[in-house]
Amino acid sequence: MKRLIGLGLVLAGLLYPFAVHFGMEHFAPWQFGLLLGGLWLARALTQPNNQGGRWMALVAIGFCVLLAVLDDPALLRWYPVLVSAFMLVLFGLSLKFGPPIVERLARLTDPQLPDIAIRYTRRVTWVWSGFFLANGLVAAALTLWAPLSWWTLYNGLIAYGLMGLLFAIEWLIRQRVRGRS
């Protein structure tokens, strides 16, 4: 059940900009808020021991309640900004309170990381933090000043393309770093 809810949230996140763009003619903002809020509530209830995930879910549910109560279409466009802010806080706090997120992920496949790999994962976590800051700022600017079509294009396609490009570049660099160690 946890995986199904997680998959639902991932799909909702990926399809959200397109759902907003094409669904605003057929659905009210409060309906988006109820659907998204329900997914976040289900996540919070199925992951009771995950403190960070619980806070993220509570903030997202708060946003969804606000969306449902205010029923304001302009609020729909702030969700990608909220997600980037979540990710920035998650990655940034891991740098302060450690271990960095990228190191945690690396230890899943290699529990005994050498010192050079630990330093590298810390740098990569900084890069991802910078990415989420920039992504959130672009999403906010598009929310405030751009037409819905630009917002949809960036948040539904370009942002994911940039994430994929960053993953690919990091993977290539990691292969070179591994080759030297």
Image (cartoon, helix red, strand yellow):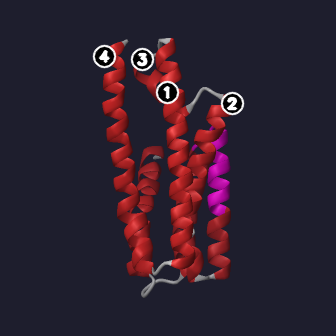
- Disc 3: CA contacts within 10 A as few (<14), some (14-19) or many (>=20): few
What kind of element bears circle 3? loop
Residue 77 in the image: above or below residue 147: above
- Disc 4: CA contacts within 10 A as few (<14), some (14-19) or many (>=20): few
Whichever of labels 4 and 2 marks the residue nearer the N terminus, that label is 2
Q: CA distance from mark 1 to mark 4?
A: 16 Å
User: Which residue is denoted by mark 1 in the rendering?
Assistant: 121
User: Which residue is denoted by mark 2 in the rendering?
Assistant: 97
Q: CA distance from mark 3 to mark 4?
A: 16 Å
Q: CA distance from mark 3 to mark 1?
A: 12 Å
**Splitting the image into 4 quarters, where does residue 95 fall?**
top right
**Splitting the image into 4 quarters, where does residue 169 fall?**
top left
Q: Nearer the viewer, residue 30 or 145?
A: 145
Q: State if disc 1 and disc 3 touch (CB < 8 Å).
A: no
Query: Which stretch did the figure color magenta?
Result: 47-61
Q: State if disc 4 and disc 1 touch (CB < 8 Å).
A: no
Q: State if disc 4 and disc 3 touch (CB < 8 Å).
A: no
What kind of element bears circle 1? helix
From the image, which quarter does the C terminus lie in? top left
User: Which residue is denoted by mark 4 in the rendering?
Assistant: 179
Query: Which residue lies at the image location 59% right of the left edge and 75% below the top edge?
Result: 75
Query: Which residue lies at the image location 45% right of the left edge and 72% below the top edge?
Result: 151
Whichever of labels 1 and 4 marks the residue nearer the N terminus, that label is 1
Residue 62 spot, x, y in % from top left: 68, 64
Q: Which mark is residue 133?
A: none
User: Which residue is denoted by mark 3 in the rendering?
Assistant: 110
Q: CA distance from mark 2 to mark 1?
A: 14 Å
Q: CA distance from mark 3 to mark 2?
A: 21 Å
| Residue 77 seen in render | no
Looking at the picture, which amino acid does disc 2 mark? Phe
